[in-house]
């Protein structure tokens, strides 16, 4: 449904770099899973997309320290007591919270940690046939096997955190709380937020800062892909 709320009564919550990160990250992770499951020649794409996901994840971690207010970890990371108190009040009418709520924050951290373990272990993994991560050649067979085991075991947790993420979004949507729209266009209607809510900075300067950071990380990712391509027998 089209939201006809006038533009001036909206407040920017998610800056453009955070929104682009989300789309790109979801695509790379989904692509990495599909290509790994298809296997064969698609493992080349698995390595490329996995490394791209790792670069994006690194971007998001750095952005969590230097990015605009609602993207910052200091703004949304909270202790177990806050999460528990939030869960206890969930049956009451939704509280107005700009940015991630305590439960959402927990799920963001879980996703970044679990997918982070997956991507880092992948750098050392090998399939004993044609594909290996860029660092597998520099470690012993035992270490590479161990990391491959971590990569295989952690796969289940990757599926669990993604499933919980999508389920939570669905539940909130059914409860009438719009989360998807703001993650796409960045804004929330002012009357759905506390009166004093300040907008997130999303000007040209902050976007250029994000562009510089992601460009630097793209070079590192490119180097890692070349390293994996030279080591793996299948790469084309
Ligand atoms: C978003 C990050 C990643 C996800 C979600 C992911 C997921 C997966 C999954 C699900 C499999 C197992 C497929 C199966 O069931 O047979 C797999 C295997 C594999 N992945 Fe990843 N992966 C990621 C990142 C990476 C990275 C960055 C690399 C290396 C650069 C990598 C290298 C490998 C290799 C070598 C295998 C084969 C291991 C084996 O034979 O068990 N992965 N990955
Ligand atoms: C593999 C798939 C996905 C992954 C790995 C993923 C990951 C993430 C991450 C890391 C965040 C935190 C954003 C940040 O603070 O930077 C997030 C938030 C969010 N994601 Fe996803 N996402 C996926 C798919 C989706 C899909 C398909 C949707 C919509 C249908 C969606 C909707 C959202 C929304 C609405 C938020 C904001 C939640 C809030 O307001 O607290 N995600 N996602």
Image (tube, rainbow, N blue to C red):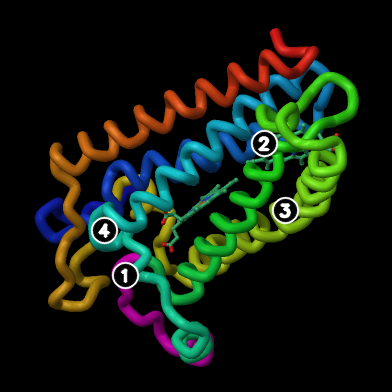
Q: Secondary structure at mark 2?
A: helix
| Residue pointed to by mark 2 | 123
Residues at circles 4 and 3 in contact by the CB criterion of under 8 Å: no
Residue at 47% in and 28% down? 220
From the top left corner, tell me how far across and down residue 96 is, in percent: 31, 77
Q: Residues within 10 Å of mark 4 (few under 14, many from 20)?
A: many
| Residue pointed to by mark 4 | 13
- Considering depth in this image, is 75 or 221 the residue closer to the camera? 221
Q: Which residues are magenta?
A: 87-99
Q: Can the viewer see residue 116?
A: yes
Q: CA distance from mark 2 to mark 3?
A: 19 Å
Of labels 1 and 2, earlier in sequence is: 1
> Which dot, 3 or 1, sits closer to the camera?
1
Of labels 2 and 4, earlier in sequence is: 4
Residues at circles 4 and 1 in contact by the CB criterion of under 8 Å: no
Q: Residues within 10 Å of mark 1 (few under 14, many from 20)?
A: some
| Residue pointed to by mark 3 | 159
Q: Residues within 10 Å of mark 3 (few under 14, many from 20)?
A: some
The part of the image, by quadrant, that contains residue 170 is bottom right
């Amino acid at each position: 449904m089209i939201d006809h709320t006038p533009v001036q009564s909206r407040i920017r919550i998610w800056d453009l770099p955070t929104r682009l990160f989300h789309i790109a990250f979801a695509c790379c992770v989904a692509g990495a899973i599909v290509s790994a499951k298809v296997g064969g020649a698609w493992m080349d794409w698995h390595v490329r997309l996995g490394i791209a996901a790792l670069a994006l994840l690194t971007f998001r971690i750095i952005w969590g320290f230097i990015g605009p207010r609602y993207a910052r970890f200091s703004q949304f990371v909270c202790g177990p007591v806050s999460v528990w108190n939030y869960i206890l009040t969930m049956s009451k009418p939704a509280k107005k919270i700009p940015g991630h709520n305590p439960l959402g924050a927990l799920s963001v951290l879980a996703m970044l940690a679990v997918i982070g373990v997956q991507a880092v272990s992948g750098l050392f993994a090998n399939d004993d046939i044609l594909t290996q991560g860029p660092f597998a050649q520099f470690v012993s067979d035992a270490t590479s096997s161990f990391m491959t085991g971590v990569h295989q075991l952690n796969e289940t947790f990757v599926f669990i955190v993604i499933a919980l993420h999508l389920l939570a979004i669905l539940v909130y949507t059914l409860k009438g709380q719009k989360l998807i729209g703001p993650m796409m266009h960045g804004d929330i209607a002012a009357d759905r937020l506390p009166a004093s809510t300040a907008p997130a900075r999303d000007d040209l300067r902050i976007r250029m800062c994000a562009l510089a950071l992601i460009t630097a990380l793209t070079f590192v990712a490119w180097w890692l892909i070349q390293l994996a391509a030279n080591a793996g027998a299948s790469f084309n």
